[in-house]
Image (tube, rainbow, N blue to C red):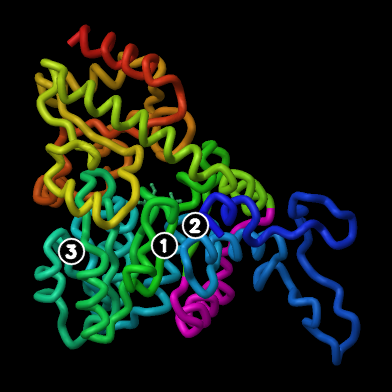
Amino acid sequence: MGFRTKQVHAGVEPDPTTGAILTPIHQTTTFVQPSVDDYMTKGFTYSRSGNPTVSALEAKLAILEGGVSAACFSTGMAATNSIFMALLSAGDHAVISQVAYGGTYRLASKIYTKFGVDFSFVDTSDPANVADAITDRTRLIFTETPANPTLVYTDIAAVSAIARGAGIPHAVDNTFLTPYYQRPLELDADLVMHSTTKYFDGHNATVGGAVVFANEQLDEEIRFVQNSTGSIMSPQVAWLTLQGSKTLSERMDRQSANAMAVAEFLEAHPKVTTVSYPGLASFPQHDLAAKQATGFGAMAWFEVKGGVAAGKRLMDTVELWTLAENLGSVESLITHPVTMTHAAVEPAERARIGITDGLVRISVGLEDTEDLIDDLAKALDTL
Ligand code: PLP
């Protein structure tokens, strides 16, 4: 079946008791067992270890990404943490995309280093850099593509081949493109990580995360950490995310078309110095973006003449665009990564990896294209 059919129906069955078309919110701690000998015959015991509403979302995500199974978490960071905790021990080493969400960098550099794990943050846009960074202690390769906020792409198939050759699992943060546009497991990655907070929810209603597994061993290892540490998704959040997921493709196509139009407008504007959007021919990795994914997504960034001061004025002047963290929602959002999403990354590291002080990140929403452009045009006129 096609992606649209799967996004609506996968994982969801009418409720066997009532016929309710939507998976009920199973707001319960525990599940009554028929007898000591029949323990777990209905599949659930205690909601930290599994909950039917959460399981429905997990089944949907696994099918959409083409994995064997999936686990949902309280946040995207909890999902990433479970990958690190399951696969890395004291003395181990991991290779991570040098540009990744600021929280991923913070988790690795500020927390896991305390436990004797070390990291190489490499420019994964060149797979050779990944091969060069691998040591005999490397136990994980974690890439984010396209990366937040610079939109640098990593060739998933090339890095997966290197990982496979070295016997190291390759995890891909697929938050920006979602399985509608990009399916890392089909390109031989071993794990896909998501902040479901973004496009799966799509409505700025929840925070959540997920990991999709290519094989049962990874499922077992990561679920063991999840159950031991208790970093689960609540049934309420799973229910909202289930509903959001059913319109993922429609939102992504419309938002991406809006993003293309906005990027073209910005590229032609005299007050804009740089625009980065993977769908533009000027995007340095446009060919890889077109080869690896079926869409370019709805994230872009730009810089304006007048540097940081002008960029800040623009962000404070726009009216329809909302100044806020988060991305992937139906509302168009404008963000200043240096003070917001990537404040946890040290200034020298930000400069090294291309997160400039004047970079304005946009997450393009579902509003009318003309309204989004008019609002930006008015704000640019004040600079
Ligand atoms: N990965 C990416 C690419 C993100 O943009 C984010 C959040 O912005 C995360 C992971 C972390 O997700 P969460 O905020 O749900 O913990």
Residue beneath disc 1: 193
Residue at x 37% of width, y 50% of height: 177
The crowd level at tag 3 (other Cα within 10 Å; few <14, some 14-19, many 20+) is: many
From the image, tell me which residue sits under label 2.
209
Q: Secondary structure at mark 2?
A: strand
User: Which portion, as a residue range, is magenta?
Assistant: 213-235
Picture quarter with the N terminus: bottom right
CB atoms of marks 2 and 1 within 8 Å: yes
Q: Nearer the viewer, mark 3 or mark 1?
A: 1
Pointer 1: residues within 10 angstroms few (<14), some, or many (20+)?
A: many
Residue in front for this viewpoint, 377 or 78? 377
Identify residue for label 3: 121
Give coordinates of residue 2: x percent, y percent: 53, 56
Q: CA distance from mark 2 to mark 1?
A: 7 Å
Q: Amino acid at mark 1?
A: Met
Element type at marker 3?
strand
* Residue under the point 10% across and 70% down: 128
Q: CA distance from mark 3 to mark 1?
A: 18 Å
